[in-house]
């Protein structure tokens, strides 16, 4: 790109603020220590810390790194400051795609860029996704430079951002599936604290990943449901339309100047008032007809092109909506698998608890009968005169009767439990 034609390479790139330093330099009579200690990472307006590194990718496929501040980017792309906050790496925002007057603001996972009709400003980063997006976009633009492609420049850049985002999220989902399935199978076989802790950690990762995928899916669906937002994103068409309008205004101004020149030049010629009035009326009527015809043709062509472009963008978004929706379904299936495993574990733990309750019930009944037998022994062990054990066989009779009575009572307990369906016997 020529330096004289690039606004970012002239005065837009912020240099060290010499005016600021000279204004508050103590050696030049300014206020001493005006800035003060402040916060260590705080950026001050007009200071070079406000610059950020951007990768500028042109329509021809060439790329370069430029240092730009927020004001320069806002002025060039006609963006509000709140849109640039979405691209700031210091903040964490959900995935967003915004269509503006002269740009498309894209914040999809690690891909944070501003797409215009002629160039892409990509937030410079050492992340692998950013480097891969930059190289792949340059490669595609250079390859398709000599090929006829129906997609305009901004749609190709947006398509690649959606493609990288969908592939990245799908890859992360597949990796999570490969890690969590063996853990769930092992947990279903053996319930242990270690396995439960691993599943809890994977479940947290699953929840965070589901929220990210759901946000991308909702953003694409929102664009597909709003024709106005999709029409706003067709930057090439709007740029061509503005150029046509400017050219028409210029031609109309030239025609009006020529018409007024002819009228002024005819002062020296003897023309009747009726003829001059009719001539001016005809000229005015002709220009009004031309303007109306031009305006009507522009409106009809704009409406037709807008409908076609909306359909084109809608098909593009629909293709990636199907992919991200498939990824979301994988996450939902994985969540259902985790829920099923948890239900199985709860069923197993409930079964074990029921068995323990049954065993405790039987043990309590046996303890009660043992207590009854102990009461008999306690009665005969008291210090009073008793003639029951004068004969040795009576002791055996008492023991036999006591054991038989306890056994009959235990059988009665079991029959009662069966009657109440406390547990099958």
Image (cartoon, grey):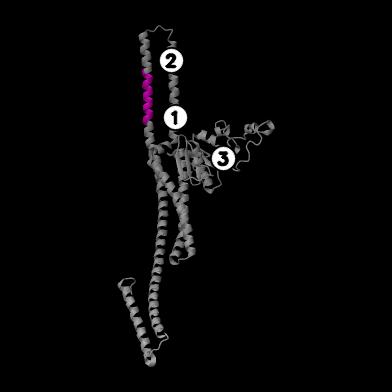
**In the image, what residue occupies the spot 41% across and 51% down?**
328
Decide if residue 47 is in sight here.
Answer: yes
Q: Position of residue 117 (x, y in %)?
A: 47, 36
The earlier-in-sequence mark between 2 and 3 is: 3
Q: Which one is closest to the eye, mark 1 or mark 3?
A: 3
Mark 1 neighbour class, 10 Å CA radius: few under 14, some 14 to 19, many 20 or more: few
Looking at the figure, which quarter contains the C terminus?
A: bottom left
**SS for tag 2?**
helix
| Magenta span main SS | helix
Residue 45 sits inside the magenta stretch = no
**SS for tag 1?**
helix
Q: Is residue 420 left or right of residue 146?
A: left
**SS for tag 3?**
strand
Seen as rendered, the residue at the extreme bottom is 391
Q: Position of residue 153 (x, y in %)?
A: 46, 38
The foreground one among 351 and 368 is 368
Seen as rendered, the residue at the extreme front is 384
Mark 3 neighbour class, 10 Å CA radius: few under 14, some 14 to 19, many 20 or more: some
Decide if residue 170 is in sight here.
Answer: no
Q: Is residue 285 above or below residue 149?
A: above
- Residue highlighted by disc 1: 242
**Residue 260, numbered label:** 2
What distance separates the C-alpha of mark 1 from that of mark 3? 31 Å
What distance separates the C-alpha of mark 2 from that of mark 3? 53 Å
Q: Is residue 322 above or below residue 191?
A: above
Residue 287 sits inside the magenta stretch = yes
- Residue highlighted by disc 3: 52
Mark 2 neighbour class, 10 Å CA radius: few under 14, some 14 to 19, many 20 or more: few
The earlier-in-sequence mark between 1 and 3 is: 3
**Residue 164, numbered label:** none
What distance separates the C-alpha of mark 1 from that of mark 2? 27 Å
Q: Position of residue 306 (x, y in %)?
A: 39, 35
């Amino acid at each position: 790109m020529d330096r004289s034609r690039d606004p970012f390479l002239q005065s837009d790139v912020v240099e060290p603020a010499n005016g600021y330093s000279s204004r508050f330099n103590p050696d030049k009579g300014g206020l001493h220590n005006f800035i003060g200690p402040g916060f260590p990472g705080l950026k001050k307006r007009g200071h070079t810390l406000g610059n950020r590194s951007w990768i500028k990718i042109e329509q021809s496929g060439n790329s370069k790194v430029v240092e730009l501040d927020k004001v320069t980017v806002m002025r060039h792309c006609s963006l509000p400051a709140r849109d640039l906050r979405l691209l700031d790496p210091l903040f964490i925002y959900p995935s967003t795609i915004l269509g503006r007057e002269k740009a498309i603001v894209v914040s999809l996972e690690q891909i944070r860029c501003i797409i215009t009709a002629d160039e892409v400003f990509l937030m410079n980063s050492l992340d692998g996704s950013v480097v891969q997006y930059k190289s792949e976009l340059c490669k595609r633009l250079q390859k398709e430079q000599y090929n006829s492609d129906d997609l305009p420049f901004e749609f190709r850049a947006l398509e690649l951002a959606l493609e990288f985002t969908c592939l990245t999220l799908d890859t992360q989902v597949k990796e999570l599936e490969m890690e969590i399935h063996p853990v769930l199978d092992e947990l279903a076989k053996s319930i242990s604290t270690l396995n439960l802790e691993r599943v809890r950690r994977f479940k947290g990762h699953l929840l965070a990943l589901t929220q990210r995928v759901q946000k991308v899916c909702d953003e694409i669906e929102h664009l597909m449901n709003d024709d106005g937002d999709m029409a706003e994103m067709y930057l090439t068409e709007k740029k061509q339309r503005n150029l046509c309008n400017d050219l028409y205004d210029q031609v109309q101004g030239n025609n009006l100047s020529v018409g007024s020149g002819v009228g002024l030049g005819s002062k020296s010629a003897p023309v009747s008032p009726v003829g001059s009035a009719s001539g001016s009326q005809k000229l005015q009527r002709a220009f009004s007809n031309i303007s109306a015809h031009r305006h009507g043709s522009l409106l009809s062509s704009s409406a037709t092109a807008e409908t076609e472009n909306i359909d084109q963008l809608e098909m593009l978004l629909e293709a990636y909506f199907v992919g991200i929706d498939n990824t979301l379904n994988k996450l939902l299936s994985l969540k259902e698998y985790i829920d099923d495993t948890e239900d199985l574990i709860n069923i197993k733990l409930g079964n074990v608890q029921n068995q323990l309750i049954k065993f405790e019930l039987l043990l309590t009944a046996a303890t009660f009968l043992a207590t009854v037998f102990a009461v008999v022994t306690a009665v005969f062990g008291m210090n009073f005169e008793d003639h029951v054990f004068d004969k040795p066989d009576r002791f055996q009779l008492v023991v036999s009767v006591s054991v038989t009575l306890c056994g009959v009572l235990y059988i009665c307990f079991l029959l009662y439990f069966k009657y109440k369906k406390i547990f099958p016997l």
